[in-house]
Amino acid sequence: RIAYVNGLYVPHAEAGVHIEDRGFQFADGVYEVCEILNGHLVDETRHIDRLLRSLGELRMAMPMSRAALGVVMREVVRRNRVRDGVVYVQVTRGVARRDFLFPAGVAPTLVVTARSADRAKTEKTAETGISVITLPENRWERVDIKTVGLLPNCLAKEAAKAAGAREAWFVDRDGFITEGGSSNAWIVSATGLLITRPAEFGILRGITRTVTLEVARRLNLTVEERPFSREEAYAAVEAFGTSASLGVMPVVRIDGRVVGDGKPGRAARALRTEFHKVAE
Ligand code: PDD
């Protein structure tokens, strides 16, 4: 495997950054995960747009032009011969003597990797659906920035695993679901409404979420962008999550309670199929 690190394509096993990189010391960095389908980057423009936004929010410099970044991403995919999988892009503020204040005149660190995913396995998972648990929201307020500070997400997903579930959905202080540890959360109400939290507060504006909204409207599904509570989720006829790595993923259990008839719902299945048609 080959990784891109600051201008060089290097063997993955030997790739490294300095111990005083601020990504390492302060999680002072941002990232993107972009799906690769049939060798193509899915929603490349949107991912680069979001990366630029994250960088801007943290007053970090973009290490290269967006066109150049696109070239590097595609080159890493090509060199690793990835047909289906993900490409990972990470930008950290750079290497400096440890100090909370931002260093001046430091070049950002850019790392790009790619890896294959077992698409058949993901499809199989989508056919049965996944279980989620809910946990109190304990992340900072700027989850709209895709930072590498993901320890709460790791802890939540570990707790999910320990409970036999695949994902954890965070619940805010008012009892509303925010999003998953690495996905956005959706439900379908008994009245047939597709409900997902507005991206303005408390969640990452997922690219898969944005595209799924477009697909839903095309399929004439009625969408309501509004917060939904854990109780509404328990009473939902369908639930699902969206992310670049899993696409539209049906949820069949929430905190051990069966959602709908316990099988992936009609809307989720239709959206998954249609989403991948758009992606390909
Ligand atoms: N996670 N919310 C959170 C907290 C996420 O980490 C992600 C993505 C999403 C979905 O966003 P998108 O549709 O753009 O992938 C929502 C990626 C896949 C990850 O960290 O691996």
Image (cartoon, rainbow, N blue to C red):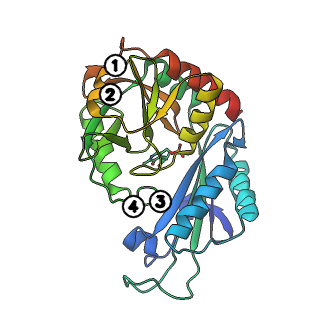
State the residue position of label 3.
145
Foreground: disc 1 or disc 2: 2
Spot occupied by residue 72 in the image (x, y as percentages of width and height): 71, 60
Q: CA distance from mark 4 to mark 3?
A: 10 Å
Q: Amino acid at mark 3?
A: Ile
Circle 2 Cα neighbour tier, 10 Å, few/some/many (<14 / 14–19 / ≥20) = many
Circle 4 Cα neighbour tier, 10 Å, few/some/many (<14 / 14–19 / ≥20) = some
Q: CA distance from mark 1 to mark 3?
A: 31 Å
Task: Answer whether labels 3 and 2 touch (C-beta < 8 Å).
Answer: no
The disc placed on residue 149 is: 4
Q: CA distance from mark 3 to mark 2?
A: 26 Å
Q: CA distance from mark 2 to mark 4?
A: 28 Å
Q: Amino acid at mark 2?
A: Ala
Q: Which of the two discs, 3 and 2, labels the residue nearer the N terminus?
A: 3
State the residue position of label 1.
259
State the residue position of label 2.
233
Task: Answer whether labels 2 and 4 touch (C-beta < 8 Å).
Answer: no
Spot occupied by residue 176 in the image (x, y as percentages of width and height): 30, 40
Q: Secondary structure at mark 1?
A: loop
Q: Which of the two discs, 1 and 3, labels the residue nearer the N terminus?
A: 3
Q: Residue 191 falls in which quadrant of the image? A: top left
Task: Answer whether labels 4 and 1 touch (C-beta < 8 Å).
Answer: no
Q: Secondary structure at mark 4?
A: loop
Q: Amino acid at mark 4?
A: Gly
Task: Answer whether labels 1 and 2 touch (C-beta < 8 Å).
Answer: yes
Q: Secondary structure at mark 2?
A: helix
Q: Which of the two discs, 4 and 1, labels the residue nearer the N terminus?
A: 4
Q: CA distance from mark 4 to mark 1?
A: 32 Å
